[in-house]
Amino acid sequence: MRISTTLPSTRTGVPDVAMARHLEDLGYDAVGMADFIVGDGTPAFDATLVLAATATATERIGLEFGVLSLPLRPTAWVAAQMQTLQHLSGGRVILGVGIGGFPGSPFWRAAGAPLKDRGRWTDLALRALPGLIRGEPTSLGDQELTLGPAAPVPPILVGGNSEAAMRRAVLHGDGWVPSLISPEALAKKAVRLREIAGELGRPVPSISVGGHAVLSDDPAAVEAFTRVLVEIHRMPPEEAAAVPVTGGPAQVAERLHAYAEAGAGMAGLSLDGGDWMRQTEILAEARAMLPPTGE
């Protein structure tokens, strides 16, 4: 099981890029960065810039977009940024993508992003991105362009829990990234993912599950998170209660194993609550307790 997490914040609220070294030392596979700018004053940082800074502070760890909202940006600009980040990092980018949330937010409107047909926009972008990143002549709208210097195309992971997202992952991605989902629900979705791949005559994408963990003694943080799932995401309370990962190394290892049994090869967990350093150690310890693949 591969693992990733997000960076903590400094006292001023800025992502603490220096802590990526800590994750690298613990053997994490990637640092994740969400693309979440609403424009109502909620603190948020540009994912590409944060991961570029992380690239300069680290040597091995992956740089994971979890996930980049494609309809927010011109596709050619995304390709140029991915080329640049691949060169800066030595090819460590993991490009998670999605149709984006909160399309009616002030930021989306100010950016001139499409509020409708986001799925179609995303599909068009996904068709063009590999060729653009590879430096091949690529048609984009009524324009043919070639970007350089060419770079390796990063793994493209398509986020979203819907069947449309699964179909998009099968057609255009290397992997599928559902989030805020229990192992039991994931197992059912994984069956459907294999069916879609069979229907389309395509390989079955890998599965990376995204979620949140509270690995400290902080019941209030667990309660606050599950309340958001119920009130904002409209989850039934019993379903919301099954989403956050909690407990010590043994309990977390059991949860990671359940995700692996359901079909996931990677878990990206944002760490809520206090003592981020200790929580990262617990997650690393839990991963080390998992049986080797195939057992």
Image (cartoon, rainbow, N blue to C red):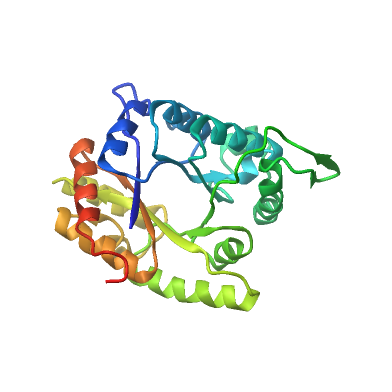
Q: Residue furthest right?
A: 142
Q: Quadrant of the rendered structure where residue 123 is?
A: bottom right
Left/right placement of residue 109 relative to residue 194 reads right
The one of 20 and 180 positioned closer to us in this rendering: 20
Left/right placement of residue 8 relative to residue 153 reads left
| Location of residue 210 with respect to 18 vertically, above or below | below
Left/right placement of residue 14 relative to residue 51 reads left
- Give the percent coordinates (x, y) of residue 78: 63, 38
Q: Residue furthest top?
A: 12
- Residue 41 in view of the camera: no
- Residue 24 in view of the camera: yes
* Residue name at image x 24 percent, y 42 percent: 280
The total of numbered circles placed on residues is 0
Image quadrant occupied by the N terminus: bottom left
* Residue name at image x 42 percent, y 75 percent: 188
| Location of residue 237 with respect to 9 vertically, above or below | below
- Give the percent coordinates (x, y) of residue 213: 27, 50
Image quadrant occupied by the C terminus: bottom left
- Give the percent coordinates (x, y) of residue 185: 38, 70
- Give the percent coordinates (x, y) of residue 125: 68, 49
| Location of residue 223 with respect to 290 vertically, above or below | above
The one of 91 and 98 positioned closer to us in this rendering: 91
